[in-house]
């Protein structure tokens, strides 16, 4: 993001929304870490602190009715797609007012109203879901595309290969976005993959593949926008590898838990210098695109929104026992539609 002249800069409204959504992810996760440490959020929790630009750049590059699937590092994706903070924080706390009625928790968030189809603690498991959603869009002729987020740890799972292959064979409108933060928990990418550059794998499935700076929200936005236009033209899927970094540990699992010194202090310090929020704010101010006062106002508003989300979640009730099976089964049987499919 050093030279804004080198990229196509979107209109001011989009720039402001980029900053707002990246801040919403950051402030939400900071509040969630605090509540988790106080025992109000149960189980492991994976934050997106440091990775905000990839999620926001990708989601703002598509339409509100387009689809998205995420990962176990799950809070950033639905926020980037437009989900409100109140219901997300309530879900993390297991409350009935949560996006999934308190049944999903941190790793299983979904909100169909903005196209967020769901996330899962099982690595790569949302990739076939994304392909299925893309097939649905193709059959219906809706013109919708699907963003499929996954991490570098997913690229050696069978679901990765199966999903990319089928999407390519059927020319499905999927944008596969790899959030490569360098580690599968503590294992470096090049220690687990014979082909450590994930974008290079696109050639095996006859689709475009690009590696870019995942800390640069404008770079992600431009690349995903191009991939979405290609998909809407019926030219099939794309693979985008966004190089990013998580500033915290793999997961929050309590104050006595540590993964050990698998990352050097120097490496962490170098990435902290590339905080996507700081990079964006500095770039737009130096280019004279947005007055500082407008960015300051967004920061104040988002701080208040995140604080209100915690209050909302804490005031909410846990779901009653009789709601335990609601939503787990189809309430009525429906005959499948008769469809004539052409995959040529």
Image (cartoon, rainbow, N blue to C red):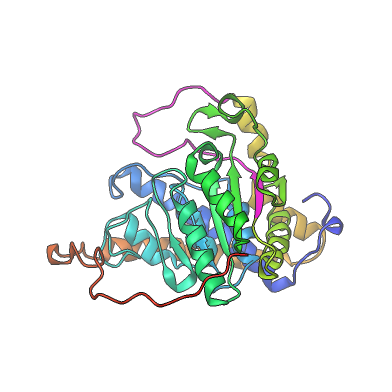
Left or right of 196 in this view: 183: left
Quadrant where the C terminus sits is bottom right
Left or right of 110 in this view: 52: right
Q: Residue, x 70% and y 40% (percent of image)?
A: 200
> Was residue 122 drawn as part of the magenta stretch in this picture?
no
> Was residue 247 drawn as part of the magenta stretch in this picture?
yes
Quarter of the image where one finds residue 226: bottom right
Q: Which residues are magenta?
A: 238-263
Depth check: 35 or 84 in front? 84
Depth check: 147 or 131 in front? 131
Residue 64: horizontal and vertical position, in percent? 56, 73
Q: Residue, x 18% and y 62% (percent of image)?
A: 324
Residue 88: horizontal and vertical position, in percent? 39, 61
- Looking at the image, residue 83 lies above or below residue 261: below
Question: Can residue 308 be seen in the rendering of this structure?
Answer: no
- The single residue placed furthest to the right in the displayed view is 5
Quarter of the image where one finds residue 244: top right
Depth check: 273 or 343 in front? 343
- Looking at the image, residue 172 lies above or below residue 276: below
Magenta segment, prevailing SS (helix, strand or loop): loop
């Amino acid at each position: 993001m050093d030279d804004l002249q080198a990229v196509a800069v979107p209109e001011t409204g989009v720039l402001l929304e980029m900053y707002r959504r990246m801040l919403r992810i950051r402030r939400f996760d900071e509040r969630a870490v605090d509540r988790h440490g106080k025992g109000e959020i149960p189980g492991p929790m994976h934050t997106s602190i440091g990775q905000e630009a990839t999620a926001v750049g990708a989601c703002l590059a598509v339409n509100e009715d387009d689809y998205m699937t995420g990962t176990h590092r799950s809070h950033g994706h639905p926020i980037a797609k437009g989900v409100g903070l109140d219901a997300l924080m309530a879900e993390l706390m297991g409350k009935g007012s949560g996006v999934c009625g308190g049944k999903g928790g941190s790793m299983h968030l979904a909100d169909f109203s903005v196209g967020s189809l769901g996330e899962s603690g099982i690595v790569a498991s949302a990739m076939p879901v994304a392909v299925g959603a893309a097939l649905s869009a193709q059959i219906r002729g809706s013109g919708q595309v699907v963003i499929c987020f996954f991490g570098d740890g997913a690229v050696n799972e069978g679901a990765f290969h199966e999903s990319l292959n089928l999407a390519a064979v059927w020319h499905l409108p999927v944008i596969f976005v790899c959030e490569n933060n360098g580690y599968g928990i503590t294992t470096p990418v090049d220690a687990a993959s014979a082909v450590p550059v994930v974008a290079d794998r696109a050639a095996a499935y006859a689709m475009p593949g690009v590696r870019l700076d995942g800390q640069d929200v404008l770079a992600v936005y431009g690349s995903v926008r191009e991939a979405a236009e290609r998909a809407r033209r019926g030219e099939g899927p794309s693979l985008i590898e966004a190089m990013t970094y998580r500033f915290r540990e793999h997961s929050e699992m309590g104050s006595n838990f540590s993964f050990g010194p698998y990352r050097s202090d120097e490496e962490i310090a170098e990435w902290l210098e590339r905080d996507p929020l700081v990079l964006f704010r500095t770039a737009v101010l130096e280019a004279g695109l947005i007055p500082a006062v407008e960015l300051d106002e967004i920061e104040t508003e988002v701080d208040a929104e995140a604080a209100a989300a915690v209050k909302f979640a804490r005031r909410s009730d846990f779901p009653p026992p009789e709601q335990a099976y609601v939503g787990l089964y189809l309430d009525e049987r429906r005959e499948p539609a008769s469809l004539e499919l052409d995959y040529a």
